[in-house]
Image: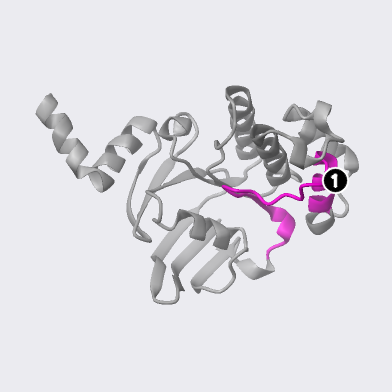
Amino acid sequence: MLQIKNIYKSYGTHRVLRDVSLSIDCGEIIGIVGPNGAGKTTLFRILARYITRYRGEVTFMETPYARVERGKIGYLAERPFQFDYFTPVEMLLFERSIKFPDLPESNLYEVLHILGLEDYLDEPIKHLSAGLKKRVAVASAFLGSPSILVLDEPLNSLDIQSTIILKQLIRDALARNAMILISSHVLDFFDGLIERTVFLKQGAIHHTCAGDARTAEEQYIDLFMPDAKEARQDIL
């Protein structure tokens, strides 16, 4: 189980997260939803261990989060960092050197093949389209079959084919008992995947609901778009 207890995070006088507590079981996937500035990316950066200074506690299988092996955490940032002059293979070799020094090199080529990158293995990332760059970032996040997957706006720049592949990678990760957190502005992506949707508002958890897109959309309108709800009722 991944447990997030009473997390607070501030930048100067600006509080980004306020008393966030959440638990995720093995083999569970949850969606984190909220408007820009709600604190989603900050929470995800904490779970990716990019941010290490905060109040509160995170544990994984009762182990303090700072002591969890890096290879157990897969992170897909909304704007992934990549070395422009690296090829996709070199980018994954770099990822392996940090997290999985004993991972067979064949595993790198397997995940690149799954994401349809076999024709671009030796092409510098700077020459790839935005969609292909995102596929490389997805490959990095799923490399080594991490136990925790943190996916921040994973659909950005992905075409329909890549989105279908991503969904299958997520289902495969769930089948091996991984725990997954996803943020997305595309609520339809949650259909058939998400078990719970957690709504962040001004850095705090305001509501949770079942994970289907219709319920999530209705709750989103209630929480963040009351004027739109009233207008829709007037029309009906």
Q: Quadrant of residue 188?
A: top left
Q: Vertical placement of 117 versus 101: above or below?
A: above
Residue drawn at 72 percent across, 59 percent down: 70
Vertical placement of 205 versus 14: above or below?
above
Front one among 196 and 52 = 52
- From the viewer's perspective, tell me whether residue 156 is left or right of residue 87: left
Give the residue drawn at x 82%, y 46%.
86
Q: Which quadrant is home to the N terminus?
A: bottom right
Most foreground residue, 174 or 204: 204
**Residue 113 located left or right of residue 151:** right
Three-letter residue code for mark 1: Glu
Q: Nearer the viewer, residue 156 or 123?
A: 123
Residue assigned mark 1 = 90
Provide the secondary structure element on which disc 1 rests: helix
Q: How is the image coloured?
A: one colour
Residue 215 in view (yes/no):
yes
**Is residue 84 part of the magenta span, yes or no?**
yes
Taking the magenta stretch, the answer to whether it contains residue 103 is no
Extent of the magenta region: 68-96
Query: What is the crowding at mark 1: few (fewer than 14 residues within 10 Å), some, or many (at least 20)?
Result: some
Q: Residue at x 69, y 38 (%)?
A: 133
Residue 40 in picture, x, y percent from top left: 46, 54
